[in-house]
Image (cartoon, coloured by chain):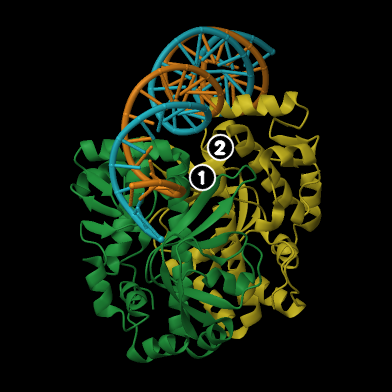
Chain colours: A green, B yellow, C orange, D cyan
Amino acid sequence: MAALAHSVRSEDPIANLLLKLRRRDQVSEHEADKLRGSIEKINHCLGGNVLVREGAPLSHAVLLIDGYVARYKDLADGQRQITELHVPGDFVDLHGFLLKHLEHHIGCLTPAKVALVPHERLIELSETEPHLSRLLWLSTLIDAAIQRERILTLGRRSAIARVAHLICELQMRLDVVGLADGKFDLPLTQIDLADATGLTAVHVNRMLRQLRTEGLMSFQRGVVTIHDLDGLRRIAEFDTTYLFLDAAPR
Amino acid sequence: MAALAHSVRSEDPIANLLLKLRRRDQVSEHEADKLRGSIEKINHCLGGNVLVREGAPLSHAVLLIDGYVARYKDLADGQRQITELHVPGDFVDLHGFLLKHLEHHIGCLTPAKVALVPHERLIELSETEPHLSRLLWLSTLIDAAIQRERILTLGRRSAIARVAHLICELQMRLDVVGLADGKFDLPLTQIDLADATGLTAVHVNRMLRQLRTEGLMSFQRGVVTIHDLDGLRRIAEFDTTYLFLDAAPR
DNA sequence: CGTTAAATTGAAGATCGTCAACCAAGGTGG
DNA sequence: CCACCTTGGTTGACGATCTTCAATTTAACG
């Protein structure tokens, strides 16, 4: 189902991005063309590929068209923490535009299709399309808001709420780009979920079982099925406002 | 000692901000004047004051001149999580400029002195001083990098490492503005530290005792004294690169 | 069909939280 | 000036949550 939705839209690499931006503000066809024109090329990556390595000099920003991509950091003993999960339509790497290099890695959790936008063209956009570039900056600020919510989750929520919250967030963000409606593809391992929630894979497994037996959701063979979104949100104390889906700047 | 350093510089409200920006790039006197001129007024706040409430419409950005300010989120059961601590010289609220309202609170943890910069003047700056405004944007991206490090800390580090890491980070950030050299004022409660590290106050207390008895640092009556910075950093796995103190964009 | 990675479950243990008591400091009002 | 009160700090005993370790099952794939 998600695959179908994708194939319908796949001709336009910025279709998902536009869906997201237009939740927040108008984007003219002219601006959309500028954005499309800024893409240098489109790459297909394998699951497990590292897109950006910590410290490496950056020349391109990455727009995620299809698949799941994560920003993550590693500790010396091999522990990993995913700091943010990206869904199709996310501009993954605008941060790198000004930072010049990143302090974390960016990798594909699944096979992914990404568009590369050279930094020079972003500079052009910032000079010729102020409104559009404000919208792009806005999305880096929303990334920061998503990260703050994650800090709250990791610092103060129980394991069951962490897992539920992650699923609620993905459901909402995927819904914005038409890739979820109570059911969505999420071809990640429980290890990935553990790295995102700050838990062990074993405990994630137990929490998923609990959510399943309580009739709230299931996660099997890479597919999430939500049976009781309200119940799930209640456990997670999920409140969409941090995603800024209705703001209307100009 | 910190009080002395402060009184010497207190004539210039952007002194600390300049110290920080100039670690990353040149800032001309002209740009500094523009920045100073954008300040509308200077406020003195009491400890405990809420500077920005979640959801409230925003018209000004806040530059922290003196004191400690925190961004935090609350849960229904009264638990609190500090998502970022701000030190003198931090532009606390550039995020609000584009977001128009925040999804979290900003409050004073101590008495604080803040400068208010109207959003209109920030717009002016963005139009007339592109280099300067890029530097300001950069600092929001570094905020995001600090938040990512906190996600790693909360998700994957032990309690002792969380406390040590927080102290290491504050030491480094205060050092940049000349407010720390192995000893610095930190008039926060252990409850504040608990809210920042995702622990309980009781456990923070135990971790502080452990750090003290191991001869690494002490925290008493609002003063942090670091006895063994290397040792502290080793426990915390602290690596300064995420603070981007040596980057040189232009 | 065999091989490997991932999922699942149980048992045991560590870390951190909860509860409760007590202490110290600082501010307030009589 | 001092009793009182409040807030924050400190400690111990106990318990819950989550991790670790290990074994087994299931699924995915050549």
Between B95 and A37, the residue placed more toward the observer is A37
- Taking B171 as reference, is B197 left or right? left
- Taking A18 as reference, is B11 left or right? right
Q: Is residue B38 visible?
A: no
Task: Tell me the subunit letter for badge 2.
Answer: B
Q: Residue, x 61% and y 45% (percent of image)?
A: B111
Q: Residue, x 53% and y 83% (percent of image)?
A: A122
Are there few (<14), some (14-19), or many (20+) residues within 10 Å of tag 1? many
Q: Position of residue A66 (x, y in %)?
A: 37, 70
- Residue type for callout 2: Asp
Disc number for residue B213: none
Q: The residue tagged with tag 1: helix, strand or loop? A: strand
Q: Where, by quadrant of the figure, is residue A172 drawn?
A: bottom left
Q: Is residue A157 above or below residue A60?
A: above
Q: The residue tagged with tag 2: helix, strand or loop? A: helix
Q: Is residue A126 visible?
A: yes
Disc 2 or 1, which lies upstream in sequence?
1
The residue labelled by disc 2 is B192
Q: Is residue A241 above or below residue A10?
A: above
Q: Where, by quadrant of the figure, is residue B176 drawn?
A: bottom right
The answer to whether mark 2 and mark 1 are in CB contact below 8 A is yes
Q: Position of residue A164 (x, y in %)?
A: 32, 45
Q: Position of residue A166 (x, y in %)?
A: 36, 50
Q: Residue, x 37% and y 80% (percent of image)?
A: A14
Are there few (<14), some (14-19), or many (20+) residues within 10 Å of tag 2? some
Q: Residue, x 23% and y 46% (percent of image)?
A: A217
Q: CA distance from mark 2 to mark 1?
A: 8 Å
Between B124 and B22, the residue placed more toward the observer is B22
Q: Is residue B157 above or below residue A35?
A: above
Between A29 and B33, the residue placed more toward the observer is A29
The residue labelled by disc 1 is B82
- Residue type for callout 1: Ile
